[in-house]
Structures are given as structure tokens and as C-alpha cells.
């Protein structure tokens, strides 16, 4: 049974009991039954609205896929992990102008990188990875 059907069933049961609205208990039960109907209506409306939002979101996703295909063509083969067919991409910030440049791994490992915005060349320094040792010869975490 749906929510509204269950609320209607309870309303029928209450009507069958001939609850007296002049008693304290009767007033409470009838108020609860009215509240239940309003909540069911609100939930049904929200559910319908949510279904509409999901439909529109799916349509927007399809439109975005078409737009990406039109703009990037066959060059846009990114999978869901954020990697393209050539590998991982890295974002570098130019120390001269602050512009962000996106490069692939081969470019990152080259000796010198030039900013696409200002043309300034800069080097990338790679730190050592792994555990470091302090001067006493003990490993640091």
C-alpha cells in the first residue's frame, strides 16, 4: 500500500470506531488523523518534485555529454577516475604570474616547464618520498 492509501485506511478505521470529538482522547485522535493526512500530502508532493528533479538532472547530464563531445570531440576520453587515455594530469602554479597550468606526467618530468600564460620558464623540484630519518638515525612518521 502507498502512503496515502494507508492514511485513508486508518481514517476509515477511525470513522468505524465512531470516535467522539467532544472527548479529550477523541480530539487528540482526530487531530492526529488530520496531521497524518497533511504529512502524506506533503510527502507525496515532495516525492513527485524529487522525481522531476531527477528527470531534469538526467536530461542535463545527457546534454553535458553531447556538449563535451561537440567541444572536445575525440580528444575527450576521460574516464570516471579523472584520468584520460594518456595518464594522470597535474596542476602546476606558475611562480611568476600565479596561473595554473595543467600538464601530463611526461611534461612534469621534463627538465623545464614554461607557463602557458606568461611564458616564464620554471623548474619543478621533487622531494624525497617515504620515511625520513632524524639526525639520530631514527625514522620519523
Image: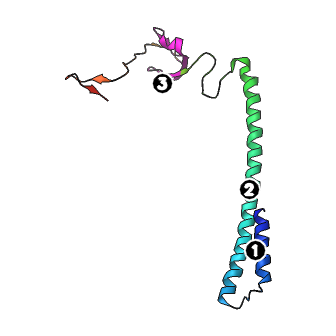
Can you give x and y, in whole percent of width and height, for residue 27 in the image? 68, 85
* The residue stretch that appears in magenta: 90-117
The residue that disc 1 covers is: 10
- Name the one closer to the observer, 57 or 35: 35
- The circle drawn on residue 98 is 3
Q: Do we see residue 119 in this rendering?
A: no
| Tag 2 secondary structure | helix
Residue displayed at 33% across by 24% down: 131
Circle 1 SS class: helix
Give the spatial CA distance, label 1 vs label 3: 66 Å
Above or below for 29 versus 136: below
Question: Which tag is nearer the camera, tag 1 or tag 2?
Answer: 1
What residue would you read off at disc 2? 47
Q: Is residue 50 magenta?
A: no
The residue at the point 76 percent across, 24 percent down is 70
Q: Is residue 14 left or right of residue 130?
A: right
Which residue lies at the image location 73% right of the left edge and 70% below the top edge? 38
| Circles 1, 3 touching at the beta carbon (< 8 Å) | no
Residue 141 vs 96, above or below: the answer is: below
Q: Residue 116's mark? A: none
Foreground pick, 44 / 99: 44
C-alpha distance separating marks 1 and 2: 21 Å
Please say which color scheme the image uses. rainbow
Q: Position of residue 55 (x, y in %)?
A: 77, 44
Residue 67, quarter of the rendered image: top right
First in sequence: mark 3 or mark 2? Answer: 2
Amino acid at each position: 500500500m502507498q502512503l496515502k492509501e494507508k492514511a485513508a485506511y486508518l481514517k476509515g478505521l477511525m470513522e468505524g470506531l465512531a470516535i467522539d470529538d467532544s472527548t479529550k482522547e477523541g480530539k487528540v485522535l482526530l487531530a492526529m488523523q488530520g496531521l497524518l493526512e497533511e504529512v502524506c500530502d506533503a510527502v507525496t508532493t515532495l516525492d513527485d518534485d524529487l522525481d522531476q528533479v531527477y528527470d531534469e538532472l538526467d536530461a542535463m547530464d545527457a546534454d553535458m555529454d553531447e556538449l563535451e563531445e561537440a567541444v572536445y570531440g575525440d580528444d575527450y576520453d576521460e574516464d570516471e577516475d579523472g584520468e584520460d587515455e594518456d595518464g594522470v594530469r597535474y596542476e602546476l602554479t606558475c611562480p611568476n604570474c600565479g596561473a595554473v597550468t595543467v600538464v601530463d606526467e611526461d611534461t612534469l618530468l621534463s627538465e623545464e616547464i614554461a607557463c602557458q600564460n606568461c611564458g616564464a620558464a620554471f623548474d619543478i623540484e621533487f622531494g624525497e618520498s617515504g620515511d625520513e630519518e632524524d639526525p639520530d638515525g631514527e625514522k620519523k612518521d
